Amino acid sequence: MTLVQEQTPTTATDEESGGPLLEVSDLKVHFPVKRGLIFDRTVGLIKAVDGVSFSIMPGETLGLVGESGSGKTTTGRAILQLVKATSGRVMFEGADLVSLSGNNMRRMRRRLGMVFQDPYGALNPRMTAGDIIGEPLVVHKLYQGRQDLRRQVGELLETVGLNRSMVDRYPHEFSGGQRQRIGVARALAARPSFMVLDEPVSALDVSIQAQIINLLQNLQDEFELSYLFIAHDLSVVRHISDRVAVMYLGKIVEVAQCDELYENPLHPYTKALLSAIPIPDPELDRRRDRIVLEGDIPSPLNPPSGCVFHTRCPVAVEDCPAYVPELREVAPGHWVACIRADGYGQYYTSTAG
Amino acid sequence: MTEPLLEVKNLKTYFHSSAGQVRAVDGSSFYIHEGETLGLVGESGCGKSVSALSVMRLIPNPPGRIEDGEVIFEGRDLLQLTEAEMREVRGSKIGMIFQEPMTSLNPVLTIGRQLTETLELHLKMTKQIANRRAAELLDMVGIADPEQRLKDHPHQLSGGQRQRVMIAIAMSCNPKLLIADEATTALDVTIQAQILELMMQLTNELGTGLLIITHNLGVVARYADRVNVMYAGKIRETGPAIDLYRNPKHPYTVGLLNSVPRLDSRSGSRLIPIEGEIPDPANLPTGCAFRPRCQWAVDKCASEDPPLVEAAEGQMTACWEHENVTRTPTGALA
Ligand SMILES: Nc1ncnc2c1ncn2[C@@H]1O[C@H](COP(=O)(O)OP(=O)(O)OP(=O)(O)O)[C@@H](O)[C@H]1O
Ligand SMILES: Nc1ncnc2c1ncn2[C@@H]1O[C@H](COP(=O)(O)OP(=O)(O)O)[C@@H](O)[C@H]1O
Ligand SMILES: [Mg+2]
Ligand SMILES: [Mg+2]
C-alpha cells in the first residue's frame, strides 16, 4: 500500500471487497481573493478545501456534514471537476479526474451525477421537464432516434415517481418536491455510478423531504449507486449514510461508520454539532446534555492557527493553537483529528510542560 | 388560572389576488400566558407568519385583510386600536424577530442608532442614557466589545450577530411578549443553538411570553411548553408539548413525526412520508383540508371540516377519527 492510501479513511472492510469506487487524496481548493480597481491584486487565499482525503465504496453513501462555508459544496464540485482543484487526486474508475484531459473528462462525466440544493434555481425555466431530463442523453448520445429518447425520458419520469404525461411541462408548473424529482431523474439519465447530492432536501418541507430521501434510497438499491450526500442537517445524514465525514473550515475533522459517529463521537466539534440538534421528542431531548459553542465560525480568509477549531473548542489546551492535528485512525474505521480525542495519544505527545 | 397575556380568538386573515382568495389564517384561536413558551409549527405556507403579522397588525393591505376575530392583549383588543396606539404596542409591548435579520435591520443606520431610536422614542431616554443602555443590551445578547460594535453597520456583522442585535432591539423595551418567526432557520446549527438558548434565558429571566414559530419539530420539542400544529390556515392540534409528541391525535401531527428524520434513529432506517403534496392555498379541498393525504379519512371528512375537540386532557384535535389515530399505523400504509 502506498502512503497516500494509508491516509485515506475508508471502511474497515476494504480488504475483502473490490476496493473503492472513488478515492480522494489530499484535495485542496484555494480561491485567491482579489482587490483593486485596475490591477487585480491577490490579497489573500480562501482555503475552501484544505487537504481532504476519503474514499467511497461501490454502493456506499458517505455523508459530508458541516456548517456553512466549511467547504462541502466545493469538495463536491472539485470531485466532479466543476471547480479546479489546486492540488490533490480524485481517483474514479481507474482514472485521476484532476489530471484528465478535457475530452477524456467529458467522456467520464456521464458516470458522475449531481443533484443541487435549490429545486427552483437548478432547472432551466425555459426547458420542459422532458428536455431537462433528456439533455444528458443527448449530450452523451445515449439514444437511438427520437422515439427511443422519448421512451427513456418517460421511464426516468416514472423511476422518480412522476407521471409520463408531465413530460412537456415547464419547471414553474411543478412543486418543489416534484422539481427535485426532475433533478434526480436528470442526474440518473446517463446511468452514473456515483452521484454528488448537495443538500438535496434542505429546501423542502418535512413531509416532502421524507419522500425524496426514500426515493434516493430506493434508487441506490436499484442502480447500485454510490453517493456523496452533502448536508448540514445531521439527522437527515444519519438516515441515508453508511459513513459520515464532518468538515470544519476546509478540513475533515472526523470520519466513522454512521452509527459509530452518532453514538460515539470523538471530536469536540462533532459532539457540539450533535448536541445542538434537538430530537423531536421532548421527554428525551430535555434529558440530553447541551454543549453550546461560544463565538462565530472564523473567517476562512483568516483561519486560526494550529487546530482550526481551537478558538471555539470547549476542551482546547495549550498545544492546540500550535499543532495541526492530522486525521488519524484511532479505532477500526474511526478517524479523528484532535489531540484531545480518546485514542489519539498514540499519535501525539504533548510538547508543553 | 389568570388571564392569558395574549388571546387570539377566531382570527381570519385573507389575501385577495387574481388567482382567487387565499384564507391564509382561517378561524384560528390560541393563547399565551406570561412567561410561557408556545410553539407554532407547520410546513411552508400554512399560515404561521400571517398569524404573527396579524397579531402585530402588519398585514399588507391590499392584498391582505384581517376579516374577523379578536386579538386580546393585556385586556385590550389590538384590532380596535388606532394606528398610533398600535405603534406604541409594537415598539414597547410586543417584540418581533424575523427570519432574515438583514431585511428588518436598516442597512444605512448604525447598530447603535437602531437601538437608541426605540429607547428614546418609547422609554423617553436621553441620548446619553440610551447610548449606555444600548451597549448594555449588546452585552446582554453576548456581543463582545459592545461600545465598538454600536458604531458598526448591519453588513459588518455575521448572520448570528445580526440576529443577536435583533433580539437586543426586540427586548430593549422589556416587552411582555416576544414573537420569533423562524428566527434561527437561516443560521448554522451551532449558532442556532446559541441564539435559542439566549432567547430562552432572557425570556425566562424577564417572564416574557414567547411565541416560537418554526417548521422545525425538534426546536419546538426542546423549548416549547405548549404546541400548535397548523395546516392549511388552521390549527389542527394543540396541547402540552410532552403530551402532543407522546400521543399525537391528529393524522397530520402523526405524519409529521413519522416523516422527520431523527438524530437518534439508526442508519438505514426508512421514513414514513406523508403521501401527496401540500394543497394549493387558493384551492383547498372541501371538508378537512388534510383529507387527500390522510390514511384515516372517512366519507364525512370530504363534506365537513372537523372542529377542535378535546382528544385527551389539555389536548385539542380537529379530526373526526381522532379516537382511531395512533402513532404507529397498523397496516394502514400497506
Ligand atoms: N468561487 C469561489 N470563489 C471564492 N471563494 C469561494 C468560491 N466558492 C466558494 N468559496 C468560499 O469557499 C468556502 C467554502 O464554500 P462552500 O460553498 O464549499 O461551503 P459549504 O460547506 O458548501 O457551505 P453551505 O453549507 O453554506 O453550502 C467559503 O468560505 C466560500 O465563501
Ligand atoms: N403578502 C401576501 N400576499 C398574498 N398572499 C400572501 C401574502 N403573505 C402570505 N400570503 C399567503 O398566505 C398563506 C400563508 O402564508 P405564511 O403565513 O407566510 O406561511 P408560513 O406558515 O410559511 O409562514 C400562503 O398561502 C401565502 O402564499
Ligand atoms: Mg454548500
Ligand atoms: Mg413564514
Image (spheres, coloured by chain):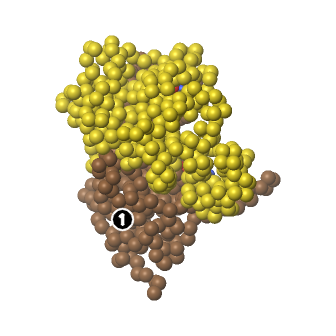
Chain colours: A brown, B yellow
Q: Is residue A344 above or below residue A96?
A: below
Front in this rendered view, residue A249 or A144 = A249
Front in this rendered view, residue A219 or A81 = A219
- Indicate the quadrant where residue B257 lies: top left
> In the rendered image, is residue B296 in sight?
yes
- Classify the position of the C terminus of chain A by image quarter: bottom left
Seen in the image, is A225 located left or right of residue B15? Answer: left
> What's the amino acid at mark 1?
Leu
Task: Give the residue number, with chain letter if any, for mark 1.
Answer: A266
- Indicate the quadrant where residue B271 lies: top left
Where disc 1 sits, the SS reads loop
Q: Residue furthest top?
A: B303
> In the rendered image, is residue B188 in sight?
no
Q: Residues within 10 Å of mark 1 (few under 14, many from 20)?
A: many
Seen in the image, is A206 located left or right of residue B128? Answer: left
Q: Residue furthest right?
A: A38
